[in-house]
């Protein structure tokens, strides 16, 4: 076998504008790889999908308190096993309007809590904002199923900050101690 027989296809091999050569789909494959813009393979998950069952705060909620607290996402399958957690923990993003919010994603190790994912905004949620949480379509369950489509949760926070700040009192007359 010649060494050129098992080489990567080059764009000259199947240039689509040259009528003497074959079109892109007839290109010789290299270990069944295709070019990225022709890759119509399904994700490495199975066909059966699972879903996001519940979120706290709920989708469409208004008047959610601002500040730092934990949000909860509940799925209908186990999504926190060691096999999939390293993949899943980077598939959740959060925005306040168009600004990305840094978050910490965690889960519980209790047996009944394996379907729940906890999201904590590191700097808290801003007041008077539309908050969007996106869970990527390739979020996986421990049984190998995919979410299938991006899950979006949108809610809004209260107009004013939930943290009540007390003003410091200034002393009008300095006291002198003797």
Image (tube, grey):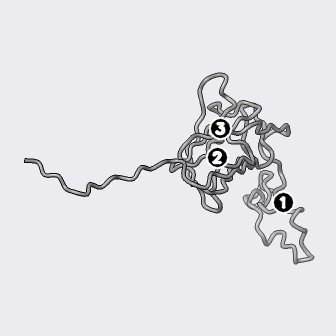
Q: Is residue 30 left or right of residue 56?
A: right
Residue under label 2, please give it: 64
Question: Which structural element holds mark 1?
Answer: loop
Q: Position of residue 83 (x, y in %)?
A: 65, 33
Of callouts 3 and 1, the N-terminal one: 1
Residue under label 1, please give it: 28
Residue 13 vertical placement versus 68 (above, below): below
The answer to whether mark 3 and mark 1 are in CB contact below 8 A is no
Of callouts 2 and 1, the N-terminal one: 1
* Distance in Å between CA atoms under marks 2 and 3: 14 Å
Residue projecting furthest to the bottom: 18
| Dot label at residue 72 | 3
Q: Pick the residue in front: 91 or 12.
A: 91
Residue projecting furthest to the left: 178
Residue neighbourhood size for the residue with mark 2, other residues' Cα within 10 Å, grouped as few (<14), some (14–19), many (≥20): many
Residue at the (61%, 23%) spot, across then down: 110
* Distance in Å between CA atoms under marks 2 and 1: 57 Å
Q: Position of residue 142 (x, y in %)?
A: 71, 32
* Distance in Å between CA atoms under marks 3 and 1: 49 Å
- Disc nearest the viewer among 2 and 1: 2
């Amino acid at each position: 076998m010649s060494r050129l027989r098992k080489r990567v296809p080059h764009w000259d091999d199947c240039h689509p504008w040259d009528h003497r050569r074959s079109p892109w789909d007839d290109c010789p494959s290299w270990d069944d790889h295709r070019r990225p813009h022709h890759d119509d393979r399904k994700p490495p998950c199975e066909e059966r999908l699972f879903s996001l069952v519940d979120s706290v705060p709920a989708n469409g909620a208004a008047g959610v308190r601002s500040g730092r607290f934990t949000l909860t996402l509940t799925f209908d399958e186990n999504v926190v096993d060691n096999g999939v957690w390293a993949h899943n923990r980077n598939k959740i993003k959060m925005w306040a309007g168009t600004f990305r919010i840094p978050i910490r994603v965690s889960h519980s190790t209790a047996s009944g809590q394996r379907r729940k994912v906890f999201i904590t905004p590191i700097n808290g949620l801003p007041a008077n904002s539309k908050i969007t949480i996106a869970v990527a379509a390739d979020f996986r369950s421990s049984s190998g199923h995919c979410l299938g489509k991006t899950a979006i949760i949108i809610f809004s926070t209260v107009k004013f900050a939930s943290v009540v700040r007390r003003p410091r009192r200034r002393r009008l007359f300095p006291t002198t101690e003797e």
